[in-house]
Image (cartoon, grey):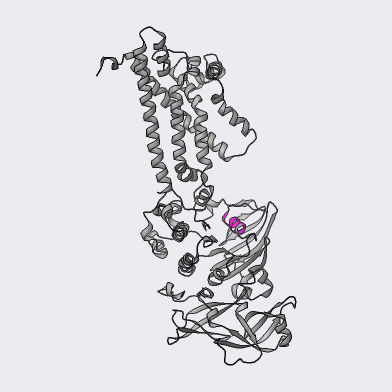
Amino acid sequence: MGHSAMLEVDVGHRLGNFNLDVHFSGDEGLTALFGRSGAGKTSVVNVIGGLIRPERGRIVVNGRVLCDTRRRVFVPMHKRRIGYVFQEGRLFPHLTVRQNLLYGRWFTPAAQRHERLDDVVDLLGIGHLLGRRPALLSGGEKQRVAIGRALLASPQLLLMDEPLASLDEARKDEILPYIERLRDEIRLPIVYVSHAIAEVTRLASTLVVLSGGRVAAAGPLTDIMGRPDLFPLAGRYEAGSVLEAKVAEHDAAFDLTVLNCAAGRLRVPRVDLATGSEIRLRIRARDIIVAVQRPQGLSALNVLPGRLAEIGPLEGPIVEVRIDLNGQFVTARITRKTVHDLQLAPGREVFAVIKTIALDHRSLGLSDRPHDVPQHTDDERR
Amino acid sequence: MPQWLHFSPEELTAIQLSLKVSIWAVVVSLPFGLAAAMLLARREFWGKSLLNGIIHLPLVLPPVVTGFILLILFGRHGPLGIFFADVFHLVFAFRWTGAALACGLMGFPLMVRAIRLSIEAVDRRVEIAAGTLGANPAWVFVTVTLPLIVPGVLAGMVLSFARALGEFGATVTFVSSIPGQTETLPLAIYTFTQVPGGEAGALRLTLVSVIISLAAVLVSELLARKAVHHAHGA
């Protein structure tokens, strides 16, 4: 077919006692490297960026071979044209924000510059900071400048290593819309390291789950997120499924928004998006109740009919079950006693009950498919 | 101006010579000091401890011994003396250049120590960030490392300058005390104290020494403060 992925990684490397051995490919959009700390996420982006020279393997970005140990190819990091946004910003302390932003541009041949200072400054909302020095910036401002600095080097690919990890919740919410704009407006391929499932759900199109230096799973986000076998890697508390939905209508009287998806209609706290907007919804497995009859007189607004597809290992107090909601799958965590008492078995007709308030703004992410960018990204998160 | 503040031509020559010797000593040793400091701060190699020891020798050896070693190596018949005379037409023996060499060597360990400490304080992760933005290692050094170590470099230069200004033992052993050629301030002061009625001259030159040293410290302090301000954006 001649189709080649935007990013191909196949490397092996030993770091002390740690063995890295990963093979995956990423496409346009945002590829999230997800896993617990120590899974090798940062090592993988360091290998892609050229900060680590791997013992074995091959890295191709946009058809350009950056590393091929067999053919003794190794492009040094300053020639890779890969942007890198570090966890701690790493701004140059002796330069102003403007000088920081323009640093990489200076090393980029004029013909290859595809970003302009004014556009990037507007995109990131950092116009008022240009004359300042990094020491006087807040954590969120530093990260925005670091993103702008990487962008202005006009990279082919952007690496982001937990860019939000050092920020508090409010600062994270400040940066996330900007990352969505990089993905959707500039259409820059991004490799994004995170151990926070909310960020990944909101941002990623492709998900690569790492564990112990190896790829545990890789593929489109919606496929991977529903797999119960990966839950231990994600941490059980946050484990859940992702549904793609469309905004159907707003219920102004009760401040709710109705979403349409294959699984049915879902009511969530109001989101300020035009009807028809595509949205992504993460439902934690612990927020789903399973019923064998349509429940009556219930406070939960969302009751979706479906069929039990799969029941996880019957060990310990808690069991994960997969429910097929008209072709969309969600995972629920219920007690083993429930499975026994309700005589649950694959194929059984069930109802998934989801509390509306469980679907707060952290569960909702804009889909990375083309859509109208909302004017007020702030409101969308309320 | 009081009568006793009138400098004799010999005294003015000594002041001029001392400034020339010290400035040359600092300027010429600076690139070597930077290179040595980078090497010691950043690289691991066989014989690193030995190199570090050799650089520090002038600090621990009696200055007369350093001067004598210079005389053996760089004297008119020393191997390095012959080499420099033949290849660069540069003669050290009993010339002001020899005084500058002795002064530069004596101040070298102080310069290297100050610069090395400041290099070790630089956050290497910031240098890596510069690399990802397209700067090759040489550019990273010029645009990131160097600006960040300016305070350390200035401190090293002042220490080395002060050491050069006060150098006595190595200079007198290596190039003797020739008025107008190798007789720097300390040597001139010493000579004045050895002749009857020389106290006034010694006092005048002492005063000049104090003023020059004080000015050097103040200027470096000012520059360093400016550089720190610059580097940390406070």
Q: How many marks?
A: 0
Which image quarter holds the N terminus of chain A?
Answer: bottom right
Q: Which residue lies furthest to the left in this view?
A: B1
Q: Relative to residue A242, is residue A65 depicted above or below? A: above
> Could you tell me what secondary structure mostly forms the magenta stretch?
helix
Please say whether residue A45 is one of the residues in the magenta stretch.
Answer: yes
Residue A134, position as x, y percentages in the image: 43, 53
Whether residue A120 is situated above or below residue A304 in the rendered picture: above
Instruction: Mark yes or no: residue B126 visible.
Output: yes
Q: Name the residue located 54 percent from the left edge and 25 percent from the top edge.
A: B59
Asked if residue A345 lies left or right of residue A272, the reply is right
Look at 62% across and 32% down and name the residue there. B49
Q: Which residue is drawn at 53% across and 19% down?
A: B70
| Viewer-nearest residue: A4 or A166 | A166
- Point out residue A242 in the picture as x, y percentages from the top left corner: 58, 77
Q: With A323 as the anchor, is B27 left or right in this view?
A: left
Q: Where is residue B20 in the image (x, y as percent from the top left)?
A: 39, 23
Residue A2 visible? The answer is: no
How far across and how far down the image is residue A219, in percent? 62, 71
Residue A355, by quadrant, is bottom right
Residue depicted at 49% across the width and 27% down the height: B107
Which stretch did the figure color magenta? A43-51
Q: Is residue B207 part of the magenta span, yes or no?
A: no
The answer to whether A33 appears left or right of A97 in the picture is right
Frontmost residue, A369 versus A251: A251
